[in-house]
Image (cartoon, rainbow, N blue to C red):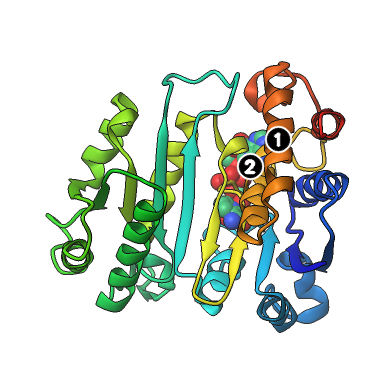
Amino acid sequence: MHNITLVKGDGIGPEISDAVLKIIETAGVKINWDIQTAGADVIAQEGVPLPERVLESVKRNKIALKSPVTTPIGKGFRSVNVQLRKELDLFSNLRPCYNLPNVKTRYDNVDIVVVRENTEDLYAGIERQIDENTAESIKRITRSASERIAKFAFDYAVKNNRKFVTVVTKANICKLSDGLFLDSARKVAQNYDIPLKEILVDNCCMQLVQNPNQFDVLLLPNLYGDIVSDLCAGLIGGLGVAQGANIGTDYAVFEPVHGSAPDIAGQNKANPTAMLMSAIEMLNYIGENDAAARIKSALFRTLEDNIKTADLGGNASCSGFTDAIISRLV
Ligand code: NAI
């Protein structure tokens, strides 16, 4: 029996969480879920969007599966997602991006792994209003955080037989901050046989759209990593299929790349694939490799049988798609 925290999130979070729980349960994995709530809805009762109980639960269980939590735009409380990653020191955000069967995309054979630094950069939330017409945000980059994420990217590359790592910065403009990130990657690379390539983020976006097959592992600071991973999601069929994991030294939180999708929340339209793919990686992480393989195979066969949600051009509902996966589980 595994003890795992589930942060159900809001928006489409509850629908896709329920779908994934049902699939994992049917696959026969014994998990004692510690279900936690966070976000705007808990503020009324508990005063904060990320209560201490959520952090304590993940610290106790070490592993969490999380669905998205809405962050108010341009005002309101700080992102629960960013706070969780920072508080638990989940320094690496790992987002493997590859084509799924029968999901039509512009390019075939996309196989990119985005490694995003998860704790600093503009996401440290150091902002101030100078006066009514001026505001500033501090972009903070440290050598220790840059070196450890570079090391994570290279270790991942070695372990997974990847050919090279490309560090993505804007070090021609942000000479000190991005310059430090780049310099750290160059230093770390000296300890590995895998080559390090370098590219500026604007050119990287253009190259990704024109020829994604030229990339392998991408190593990015927090902000570029956030943006480029959505771009990469677009290359493989959209946010509905893009998986992710936040991994630190002590804890790991698995969650899809996408947000809470308020435009389709509560309508049984959400694609649970991104959350399911994140959960499959979580199962591999805890050693449930057989169940992970069986669930992945059932998911792939569902897509091959042309059962898809609306974001992929199909007409299956979230629950219909889930049941189709379950009926293919062996
Ligand atoms: P979003 O990822 O929620 O949605 C962007 C578009 O993709 C929407 O049209 C949505 O319907 C579609 N989409 C996303 N996931 C889908 C799925 N599983 N199935 C089908 N369609 C899907 O991004 P948006 O609208 O910018 O953000 C909404 C909220 O989510 C914001 O409050 C944002 O801060 C939050 N957010 C939370 C994240 C997290 O919890 N890790 C990550 C990203 C955003």
Is residue 221 at least partly visible in the picture?
A: no
Taking 160 as reference, is 142 above or below it? below
Ligand 1 is within 8 Å of the C-beta of the residue at disc 2: yes
Residue at (40, 54) in percent of width and height: 159
The residue drawn where x is 65% and y is 27% is: 311
- x then y, percent, for residue 35: 82, 67
Q: Residue at x 84, y 59 (%)?
A: 30
Report helix, strand or loop for mark 2.
helix
Judge whether residue 137 can be spotted in this image: yes
Residue 274: numbered disc = 2
Label 1 CB-ligand 1 distance < 8 A: yes
Task: For ligand 1, give the image quadrant.
Answer: top right
Percent position (x, y) of residue 91? 45, 69
Nearer to the camera, 142 or 152? 152
Amino acid type at image mark 1: Asn
Can you give x and y, in whole percent of width and height, for residue 36 in the image?
A: 78, 69
Q: Which residue is mark 1?
A: 271
- The reply, left or right, for residue 298 in relation to residue 129 is right
Near-viewer residue (138 or 307): 307
Residue at the (30%, 26%) spot, across then down: 211
Q: Is residue 216 left or right of residue 18?
A: left
Q: Is residue 127 above or below residue 301?
A: below
